[in-house]
Amino acid sequence: MLKDLIISMRPKQWYKNLILFVGIVFSRNLFDFSMWFSVISAFIIFCMLSGGDYMINDILDMERDKKHPTKRKRPIASGSLKKSHAILFASLLIILALSGSYLINSLFFIVSIMFFFLHNAYTLFLKHIILVDVLTISTNFVIRAIAGCLAISVLISPWLIICAFLLALFLALGKRRHELVLLGEEAKGHRKILEEYSTEMLDQMIGIASGALIISYSLYTFLADNIYMMLTIPFAVYGLFRYLFLVHAKNFGGETERIFKDKGMLLSMILWAVLVVLILYGVPDVVVRVVGGV
């Protein structure tokens, strides 16, 4: 049962909560180790909240998931995990997570509650409204980014909000397209909202979202204090285009975490992250701080 509980928490999707660390990086506090306890605690709390919400989602979608070629193998949908056990564990997980968020600070606690309620509102009814479904997913990414800043009490950049929103929207639209292609005629049986979408419409929206994201990120680098941030643009653009290639040619999109298994995507993300740190903190300063920390 323990294994089924862990699987139902979907730890493979906890990578989405890594966006909580963006605040400490771009506020130039990466080497302020006094802040790391708070941001790591915030990350763990959001993983617990996400895990509890995913279990609630699986309980409510149990019958629909049984019609899906891969989701029917999930513990709750397959029957290997009892519904009553899942409800009890999810409740305890959420209570512990919200209690922990209050210990960090009151603003982080409020944002954690917002994340919890919006996630469940999506599960209950927002995911059945065309366009609102993908916008809600994107908003939850923004809440994660804001939570990371509030956990360490740093300024919330408007560029962080817009770029996080557009990136999440881009990924959400890619997932909807993948579901349409994968399920075909059975798509509306699994997720009723899919009958409102078409691959042509989603392709247009993906194009708009990716274009807006590239422009927004480019403007951020142009207006940043360090002009060398513009050097990161090619890596960001390559990552977006590589993902589009994987969605169309390799049928990625349904499980976004698969991008970490693609060498091109993984290399571009690593190079982008390393370059951002070196530019924001300065090469000599990074070396001194890292060596000093060791």
Image (spheres, rainbow, N blue to C red):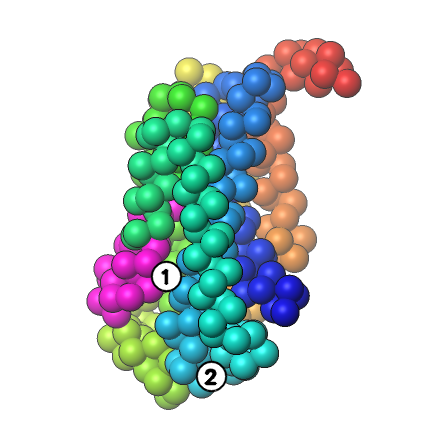
Image height of 5 relative to 152, above or below: below
Q: Residue at coordinates 47% horizontally, 83% vertically from top-left?
A: 66
Q: Mainly helix, strand or loop, the magenta region?
A: helix
Residue 157 is situated, as x and y percent measured from the top left of the image, at 34, 27
Under circle 1, the secondary element is helix
Q: Quadrant of residue 158?
A: top left
Q: Quadrant of residue 175?
A: bottom left
**Membership of 251 in magenta stretch:** no
Which numbered disc, 1 or 2, marks the residue that appears first in the sequence? 2
Q: Residue at coordinates 41% horizontally, 42% vertically from top-left?
A: 98
Q: Residues within 10 Å of mark 2 (few under 14, many from 20)?
A: some
Q: Are marks 1 and 2 in contact (CB under 8 Å)?
A: no
Under circle 2, the secondary element is loop
The residue that mark 1 highlights is 173
Asked whether, in this view, residue 231 is left or right of residue 109, the answer is: right
**Identity, as a three-letter code, of the amino acid under mark 2:** Lys
Identify the mark at residue 74; answer none if there is no mark: none
Q: Which residues are magenta?
A: 119-143
**Identity, as a three-letter code, of the amino acid under mark 1:** Leu
Could you tell me how far apart the alpha carbons at marks 1 and 2 are, in whole angstroms? 23 Å
Residue 165 is situated, as x and y percent measured from the top left of the image, at 34, 45
Asked whether, in this view, residue 64 is left or right of residue 291, the answer is: left
**Membership of 124 in magenta stretch:** yes
Image height of 100 relative to 184, above or below: above
Residue 86 is situated, as x and y percent measured from the top left of the image, at 49, 67
* Residue 241 appears in the rendering: no
Q: Quadrant of the C terminus?
A: top right
Q: Nearer the viewer, residue 71 or 167?
A: 71
Q: Nearer the viewer, residue 224 or 92?
A: 92
